[in-house]
Amino acid sequence: MSSHIFMQTIVNGLFTGGIYALVAIGLTLIYGVMSILNFAHGEFLMLGMYVAYWSFTLLGLDPYLSIPIAAVLIFLVGAFIQRGLVQRVADSHPLSQIILLLGVSMLIMGLVQFFWTADPKMIHVPYETEVFIWQDLRFSIPRTVAFFTAMFSALLLYLFLQFTRTGKAIRAVSQSKDGALLMGIDVKFIYMLTFGIGAAVTAIGGVVLTPNYRMTPTFGQAFGVIAFVVVVLGTMGNFIGAFLGGLIIGVVEAFAGFYLGGDVKIIASMLVFIIILMFKPSGLFGGKNA
Amino acid sequence: MRTFKNNLKDFLIETFMDWDKMQLLISFVVLLLIGLSPLVVKSPYYMGIIILTTLYIFLGISWNIVAGFAGQLLIAHIIFLAVGAYTTIVLNNTYGVSPWIGLPLAGVVAAILGVIVSFITLRYGLKMDYFALFTIALMVALKTLFQKWKFVGGAVGMWVRLNNPSWEKMIFKAKEPYLYIALGLVVIGLLIQYRIYKSKIGKYFLAIREDEDAAEALGINTAFYKTLAVVIGAALAGVGGGFYVMYVNFVEPLQVFNLGLNVEILMAAPIIGGLGSLAGPVLGGILNKPIVEFIRGTLAAERSGTSLIVYGTFLIISILFMPQGVTGVFYKIYLKLRDRYVKEEL
């Protein structure tokens, strides 16, 4: 492996990893605040893709312009699911929570398949196969945009959590639900908000994938599974951990794909997962702070 | 000398006063009805539904023990069923081993996988969430692995050769023999489930489900009993997977390493019936497959995605509105009947 291919593989890995990072941030945020494993997480990514598809088909909007539409719509979907369904099992056995979210996941996939069939859909934009070359490295335009959009969204979310009142309230709930309640924070509202935000950033990840990927109702599942691995790697509930974990898994997969072939890269993620669970189950970032 | 009639009366009263025994009785009445169904049902299509219903009851029991009794977040339980199915069909096709030996071996192989998974994720102090995430990720990884593995047929999968039906090959022309094998499995499953529930092990499982730290503090080796629950569930699912593949004659990675099928054949029956109850898998199982077939057959045969919608709705409604399931409804009726009876006796 020459140094050139080596660098190219790293770039490819980081580009995929950027999306993983964004999806995992949504998942880890929800887990950190609510201690709920969102088994319907991948479906928000898939819904984001379909929003982009319909904005493109019906309104002729470029996928990148539909980012705000997808973010707002999927935020509302997420907030509704939290308030209407998940909040009712907030204090139940984790098994009930997981079964409920599994049901939500199947229902979303089923409805999408029912109304828009399982046929793969694709958005064709003029720049979908364009690349630019810098330092002998090839950068696909849509994937570059996807990567930087993901990084930018993650940064915005980070600043929001660090510096706004609401963001601080979210972090407070994540650290101690009871403490936050005593300080007069509306914990139920924060739950709803967090679930909506987690869904929305994931949907953004879905939208920026659309120029490269065909969408199907089950497309989100693979990303959901990877996001699980990423959040465990980066310590469950840890924002920075999910971000770096996503990039790491992206690069690991790129190298595994290079050596073993594209479709077995999930096995590499699985090996990473097993190694973390065996030797460092608390993840790379031991403590928990969102 | 007491007459047989008196003995029977005592037995019935004793059973009636004990809800656990009542659940067992209800289950066996249902099984008896299923066993008699070939007298009425002649169409192979409906017979097929009854056979799958029976098999789903057995598979539901296997998940009920792990998730319902011990409260473990074993979501992708289907990995054990899949491994059992592959074990049986590989033994049958490649080595000519009869499924009658293959089925127990499928249970053993699935149990070994259960031990490995538990060793990685069920140590004490490791959050139970990891277990849920791990089994899902393992399912996806195994799907890819089996798709690449030529020995088990790769992505194409494997078929059971159907020439010359015979008892020892577990291949029959008629459907009824399959029904009675499935019923036999359910009877064994129900007895195992009842024995576990009544034993000390069952009490440990419940203690772990309610509060693992408290159980550990009381001196229960929680890691061991969690592993035991997973291994029992895995072994039963493995045997069920072996029968499944002999009945549907076919297995491929995309079909069995699949969360949709996982919900349909393993989780739905105990959840609808009442997770953690003795009669749950039976009472949920007799609703599960028939309702879905009815909906698929009448309302939306031509649209895809209906079974996802139906199962998704099943899960949501069960958790939000009927956490005790159908068994809970039966229990309320039972309590009323018992109160009336007790008053009359006094």
Image (spheres, rainbow, N blue to C red):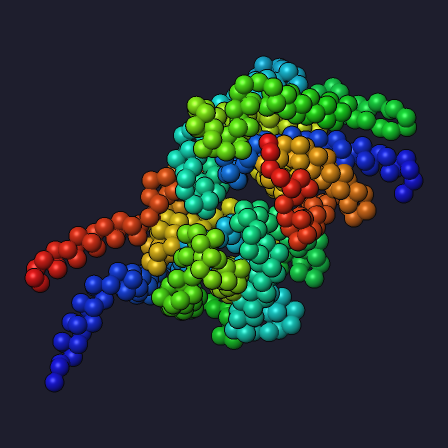
Percent of width and height locating residue B47: 39, 59
Q: Is residue A258 above or below residue A186?
A: below
Residue B167 seen in render: yes
Of residues A66 and B89, the one drawn nearer to the viewer in this rendering:
A66
Residue B293 falls left or right of residue B126: left
Residue B58 seen in render: no
Percent of width and height locating residue A165: 54, 18
For the point 53% across and 20% down, which residue is it? Answer: A166
Q: Is residue B160 above or below residue A216?
A: below
Q: Is residue B77 above or below residue A33?
A: below
Percent of width and height locating residue A188: 43, 28
Q: Quadrant of the C terminus of chain B?
A: bottom left
Residue B238 falls left or right of residue A83: right
What is the quadrant of residue B178 in the picture? Answer: bottom left
Residue B307 falls left or right of residue A2: left
For the point 88% across and 37% down, which residue is it? Answer: A5
For the point 75% across and 31% down, which residue is it? Answer: A15
For the point 64% across and 16% down, which residue is it? Answer: A65
